[in-house]
Amino acid sequence: MDYFIELFFGGLTRGSIYALIALGYTMVYGIIGLINFAHGEIYMIGAFTSFIVATVLSIYGFPVLAIVVIAGLAAAVWSASYGFTIEKLAYRPLRKAPRLAPLISAIGMSIFLQNYVLLAQTSDFLPFPALIPEFAFMEPVAHIVGSSDLVILVTTALVMIGLTFLIKFTKIGKAMRATAQDKTMAVLVGINVDRVISATFIIGSALAAIGGLLIASHIGQINFYIGFIAGIKAFTAAVLGGIGSIPGAVLGSLVLGLTESFATGYVSSDYEDVFAFSLLVLILIFKPSGLLGKAETKKV
Amino acid sequence: MSEAILKVSGLTKNFGGIKAIDNVDLDIRPGEIVALIGPNGAGKTTFFNCLTGIYTPSAGDIRLCNPKSGLKTKLNGMKPNKITEKGMARTFQNIRLFPTMSVLENVMIGRHCRTKAFILGAIFRNPATRREEEEIIEMSYDILKKIGLHKEVNEEARNLSYGAQRRLEIGRALATEPFLLLLDEPAAGMNPKETEALVRLIRQICSEGHSILLIEHDMKLVMSLSDRIFVMDYGKKIAQGTPEEVRSNPAVIKAYLGEEVDA
């Protein structure tokens, strides 16, 4: 039973990280209908930024909590500025182009960013300091649920609540929903759609950066390639839940995380991806719009 | 006579070789209800799209003059959201509400361009942002009362009846505080009772200081409501004047009913 619970929490942790990244995919898709393939790289850049900041701060002997908070904020801001810039440079000029053009631009951006980090940093795996300490109160259950799992779960939950609030109740959230539902009409009621799209990229990128910090600290190493794999997984999770739907992205991520965790635990870690993608195929066969996605019916 | 709040001169819009609008002049004075009529395909909606910045005119001039501040703006080439900020709002021929947002939210969103708070305000929720939010809600309720939807505030817009959706579109446009309201076939598909309520609503809006330019096919509505009428056919303006003048204008009759053929 302990083993089951351990796998269960491991899956939830994994799913939470996917969710932080998947939200960026799904929000951008919801608003401009683009799969932002460079989003995984944003997450990777977030991990690198927090690595650099955390290393510098630990040299100066900052307390661990301060390091986590400052590194997290720095990563969020830095990644957000990347997200903002990518949208401006690579997607905005193509807003009126056929759908394939920005998609290819996104893939190009992803390759560019990977290689940029490869050249600017290193191709080796870098040991990431364990930023999250082992809490004393977690001692009795530490063999099942680690402290960093707990921190990841709590952080993700808080971020989700904050995001839900932002989208449901604030002005920018209303503007985002309006833009997603009818861009032309949104402009006509006076919404600056460009600004709303920028804000979406900023929020999505900041979330991915937080994910980057958490997972890097959890796993203990980073390299320039982590964004690709995490990006594909998070994208899968977003599609699984119904791309464009925010609760769908979260649900899809948790389902994917749990599937992978149980597959690893009961079968073999070699089969992790087999199970994950088989699940995706099955869901797409039986519910093509994803778990919570709306079937798109175009009014004619 | 006071100055025109909207002055369109020589407006032309080409789509490839087709002249959808050909050298059209039009003006609206403060407090007026002006109708734009014409057979289907005459270019009326294209004309609206040029005014509101969805299309960029091929030639011609669109000038808006705020009756309160006297501020004049040339609208050609401006972005639609900027034009809305200048005080012109519109509704669509086919309903374009935000379907899964509530009635209240649909109106509140119209208020967006008049408020300042943005992403930081949303995160920190400072007192100014909160006050602004309260004012928006209050004002939105006033508008909903005016259009008779104050009992359905939390309903999703798509669940409203057809007539109510049309009124909500007008309410959302009003929330942007326009001095000029463009209505594209507001009575389309309405039953006589709904049309009657609409006429009352338009009159009330006009009496509160908004000028109105409307496209409509319901001639009874047009004739009873408008101060002046402009008639378009094949992209050209073929007539203008008071309802009486237009009704008896041979060119208008020809455009609508065709020419008599001597057999």
Image (tube, coloured by chain):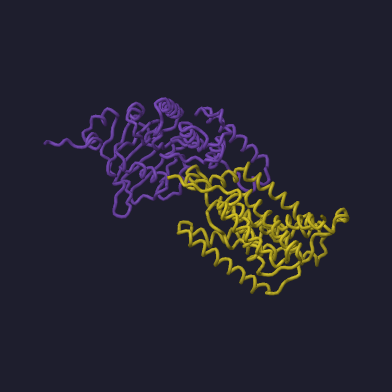
Chain colours: A yellow, B purple
Out of A212 and B170, give the one closest to the viewer: A212
> Which residue is at a point 29% across and 44% down the rendered structure image?
B235
Q: Position of residue A261 (x, y in %)?
A: 72, 59
Would residue A94 be found to the left or right of residue A280 on screen?
Answer: left
So how many labels did they put on this image?
A: 0
Out of A117 and B75, give the one closest to the viewer: A117
> Which residue is at a point 39% across and 26% down the rendered structure image?
B192
Would residue A172 be found to the left or right of residue A299 on screen?
Answer: right
Q: Position of residue A92 (x, y in %)?
A: 51, 58
* Residue B76 visible within the image: yes
> Which residue is at a point 29% across and 47% down the rendered structure image?
B22
Out of A6 and B178, give the one closest to the viewer: A6
Give the image quarter of residue A62.
Answer: bottom right
* Residue A201 visible within the image: no
> Which residue is at a point 62% across and 38% down the rendered structure image?
B133
Q: Residue furthest left?
A: B263
Q: Is residue A197 above or below residue B146?
A: below
Q: Position of residue B84 (x, y in %)?
A: 47, 42
